[in-house]
Image: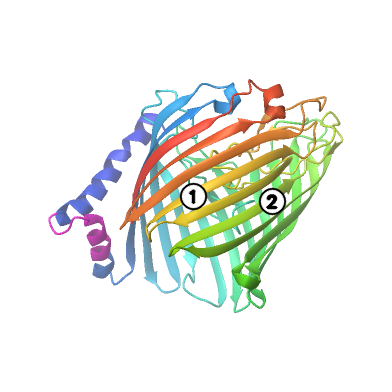
Amino acid sequence: MSLRLKGALVVPVFALSVSLLAPLSAQSWDPGTRATTAISSATNEKLKLTFEQRGRYEDRTGTTFGKDVDVFTGLFRTRLGLAYTPVKWLKLSGMVQDSRAPWYGANAPSNMRDPADLHEAYIELFPSYKKGFGMTAGRMMLNYGEGRLIGTPQWGNLSRTYDHARAYWRAPKAQLEVLVVSPVKVRLDEFNRPVLGDRIWGTYDVFPNFYKKNLLEAYFLRRDQNRPGGFTAGSSKDGTDKLGINTLGFRLAGPLSLGVKYSLEAALQKGKVGPADLSASAWLASLSRRWTVARKTLDLSAEYKYASGTENPADTRHSSTFDQLYGSYHDKFGHQDLFGWRNIHNARSLATLGVTKNFAINFLYDNYWLANLKDAIYNGSGKLIARSATGTAGRHVGQEADCYGTYKYGHFTFGAGYGRFFSGQFIEKTTPGIGPTYLYVFHTYSL
């Protein structure tokens, strides 16, 4: 499938959306709402239309701490989806997504652009039932828990999606689920598809009222990756060209006294990373509370995260670097999305002031240290940014301060933000040391 043919599919997609919305434009200033309502009413709520158009204009300086060129570009993402429920026990859903970065130029990377492609296409059995068996299969955006191990990051211009199958049993106090998921690989010159040699399978079980109003999530996940799936270490001659990691973990969340809420998550990993035996761990703890100040809401939260690293990366027989699987980390390690959940200590605080019902301002602060001095700091995709092989570059990575606001009006959302990273000793000694900045404005229309 050529890029020209793939890109040409944008025309019928947008022609369809215009044909649906245009006849109603004279009836309302917001024809999208009228269109979705009319379609639902005409089909007795069996067919539903979803639509999203988002534009973001961003200026990034000090990219990769000065290793890469600064970026000033516009990012535009459009989604058109349909969901059809012919009978109560069956749902069919599909979505087309078109992502572009026209200001970047002809060589925009694959994490910024992907001409019209199939983003979701799945079936769901017994979707509205609260008890008993249910399942989904096909291509779908997925989030488990807070998305730290399996998630769909929506801030990016593309957002991850998965080809998957999962079956679950629902009861008043539990949902027991088995799953297999494989992330879809973006392919600029053809339709996207997964590489099944990169997959997770296992169980993810949810107990919403484990103790009073406390939530418990327990999971066992197995990640397998071979050379076609993206694993590059090891040798096929001795069978070490594969990754196999078992992750056992839990998440607890709920209310404490005085209006305070908490969240705890911990995960242990055992397995093989090529020829190396893996033994790793990660955990987090957070507290949050809502206050009222001068009739305005003020949400405060504090969080501490840890993920293990390898004490001696030169040792090919043992590894302790936590594998973050397919996590979604926007805002979890700062608004600039510089780091991931590997070999890191992170202290984080967030204050959200609700100026009005529709307007909020956020103040975010993060501080970062290495868990092990000789291991690297990693980005949100789990890839190495910088390393001090001797461990003499220091432990402190740096600090980040962010301020951003959002305003909602009907189906529209507008926002802007600014972030600044202040390099610590480790970044100053292992990179050009430039502290990245991030300035952006965005607008979104969604149905």
Kindly identify the residue that appears in the image at 81 percent across and 31 percent down.
313
Placement of 54 over or under 82, stated as above or below: above
Residue 70 relative to residue 281: left or right = left
Q: Looking at the rendering, in which quadrant would you find the C terminus?
A: bottom left
Kindly identify the residue that appears in the image at 37 percent across and 52 percent down.
407
> How far across and how far down the image is residue 284, in percent?
70, 54
Q: Amino acid at mark 2?
A: Tyr
Boundaries of the magenta span:
26-39
> How far across and how far down the image is residue 60, in percent?
48, 29
N-term-proximal mark, 1 vs 2: 2
Kindly identify the residue that appears in the image at 62 percent across and 46 percent down.
326
Judge the density around disc 2: few (<14), some (14-19), many (≥20) Cα neighbours within 10 Å.
some
400 or 111: nearer the viewer: 400
Placement of 5 over or under 47, stated as above or below: above
147 or 361: nearer the viewer: 361
Q: Which residue is mark 2?
A: 304
> In the picture, residue 23 is in which quadrant?
bottom left
Residue 163 relative to residue 93: left or right = right
Q: How is the image coloured?
A: rainbow
Q: Which residue is mark 1?
A: 362
Placement of 334 over or under 145, stated as above or below: above
Front position among marks 1 and 2: 1
Q: CA distance from mark 1 to mark 2?
A: 19 Å
Asked whether 36 falls inside the magenta stretch, the response is yes
Kindly indicate whether the residue at mark 2 contacts the one at mark 1 (C-beta within 8 angstroms): no
360 or 345: nearer the viewer: 360
Asked whether 64 falls inside the magenta stretch, the response is no
Q: Amino acid at mark 1?
A: Asn
